[in-house]
Structures are given as C-alpha cells and as structure tokens.
Amino acid sequence: MIHIKSEKEIQLMREAADILKKVLKEVEKHIKPGVTTNYLNDIAERVIKENGAKPSFYGEPCPYPGGKDYKHALCLSVNDEIIHGIPSDRVLNEGDIVCVDLGVYKNGFHSDAGRTFGVGKISKEAQDLINVAKEAFFEGINYAKEGCRVGDISNAIENYVYSKGYTLLEEYQGHGIGREMHEDPGIPNIGKKGTGPRLQNNMAIAVEPMVCLGSNDVYVKKDKWTIATVDGKITSYYENTLVITENGPEILTLD
Ligand code: CO
C-alpha cells in the first residue's frame, strides 16, 4: 500500500533528512587514505545520537539465509562492492571509491541517502562512474511528478546509464519511504515508460541508481550482506529521499 504523506508528516521527514545531511557532511570530511570503515561508521553513530535520532538500518533483517540483523549506521561499500558493505577494520587507500549509504530515523520517520566518494586522488574512470550514478538520479527524477508512473523514472535511469556504456544492478531498487524505511512502491532502475504505479503529490520515495563499470553480475560475500561485482570492476551508487510536490520533486536529503 502506498502511503500519501500529510504536510505534517512531510515536515517530520524533513527533520530526519536534515540530520542525515549533517551526518553525511561529517562523514565526508573524514574520508581519506588510512581511515577504516569502522571509523567512519563511528562518526555517523555519534552525530546521529547527538541529534537525538537513530540509525534507520539498525535491526534490518538480513535478506540472505543465515545472516545476522544489521547493526551499523552505515553501509560502506568499497570499489567492487556496490551496496550493503559492512563497516570493518578495512583501511581505505588512495584511489579507492567508497559508497556511503545512510538512513536516519527521527520522530517516527525515516530518511535514506547514498553517495560515492573518492579517497584521495582517484582515476578519471572512477570519477566518471561516480558522476554517472548522480546524473542518472537526476534523469530519473525528471519524472518524479504527479501523472507520471514509476516506470517513467526507471526508464529514464536505464536509458541514461546504458547510453553511457555502463550497466545497472537489476536485483535491487529504490522504494517508498516514511514510517517504514521500505514502503511501496518499489522504484526499479530499469523499466518501461508508462508502466507501474502512478505517482502522486505527497508521495515520498527514495531513488537509487546502482551503476557498474563492467558487468552487472554480482554475488553476496561471506558476510551475507555485501554485494560485489563478479568481474571485480568498480561500482557507484547515488540515492536521495524526495517528496513529490506540485512544484516538482523536493529532495529532502540534498542541500
Ligand atoms: Co534506499
């Protein structure tokens, strides 16, 4: 069921998203060669707590049999890891790229966003890949307006990414968001124009293209969470929570 938000609920989502933006800024400042992904997660946990909020990802059940519930604030996915990387004592090196995915829960509402950052100086190939995920998000949200359908967003993302010679992860998608982190409708990154649920004003959705430099074949690592490419090539990810309004999409998790 799709939950259309009231003005009051949207205001509460803005507050959660404002904290998310602070956390992301603080984490970004500390991304440099030599830091561990645990260290970045600790920063996120601290800033979330200081702001009287909770990490949305706490307690998220593992989608794979035998895996444990998620117990970190961030997913930190490095290079060939595309999503759901678990913070660890892994040290970031110059030239790596790291996807930071973050959810903040406050006043009964979630916000969700992701960015890919370079560690020190990165290759042009990596920077181009980072740019494409972000650009694909903006291509998609041209259709985040009442009267369009979910498939219009999906199709715009798909066309953009494949026209640039990259591929998209097909097994994972964006989603509605609100009192639950994952609500209806699902927002696939691949699809046909004019298909899927109709978009309406005051719907809140998270749009999240996950882009691969090479093949989009992926596997789940032994930790039962991290999704990485089979060919070992790098990936990038970009996500925001937004509300559909009569004046176009209001992106809550972006300044
Ligand atoms: Co999401």
Image (cartoon, rainbow, N blue to C red):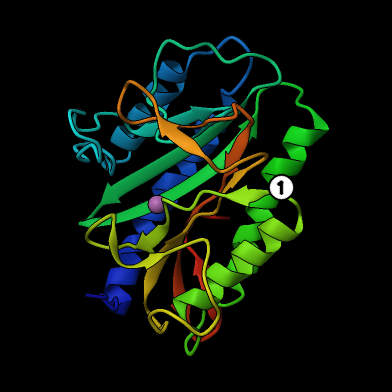
> Which of 197 and 11 lies nearest the eye of the viewer?
197
Query: Where, by quadrant of the figure, is residue 199 drawn?
Result: bottom left
**Apparent side of residue 214 relative to residue 239 in the rendered image (left or right):** right
Residue 167, relative to residue 185: is it above or below? Answer: above
Q: Residue at x 28, y 57 (%)?
A: 182
Q: In terms of secondary structure, where does tag 1 sit? A: helix
> Which of 63 and 198 lies nearest the eye of the viewer?
63
Q: Within 8 Å of ligand 1, the CB of disc 1?
A: no
Q: Residue at x 47, y 87 (%)?
A: 146
Q: Residue at x 66, y 23 (%)?
A: 119
Other residues around mark 1 within 10 Å, as few (<14) / some (14–19) / many (≥20): some
How many numbered marks, from 0 up? 1
Q: Residue at x 47, y 12 (%)?
A: 90
Residue 249, relative to residue 169: is it above or below? Answer: below
x then y, percent, for residue 31:
58, 23
**Apparent side of residue 30 relative to residue 103 in the rendered image (left or right):** right
Name of the residue lying farthest toward the right: 124
x then y, percent, for residue 38:
40, 17
**Apparent side of residue 57 relative to residue 133 in the rendered image (left or right):** left
**Apparent side of residue 186 relative to residue 144 in the rendered image (left or right):** left
Name of the residue lying farthest toward the bottom: 147
Determine which residue is flagged by label 1.
131
Query: Where, by quadrant of the figure, is residue 223 drawn?
Result: top left
Task: Give the quarter of the figure containing the N terminus.
Answer: bottom left
x then y, percent, for residue 200:
40, 84
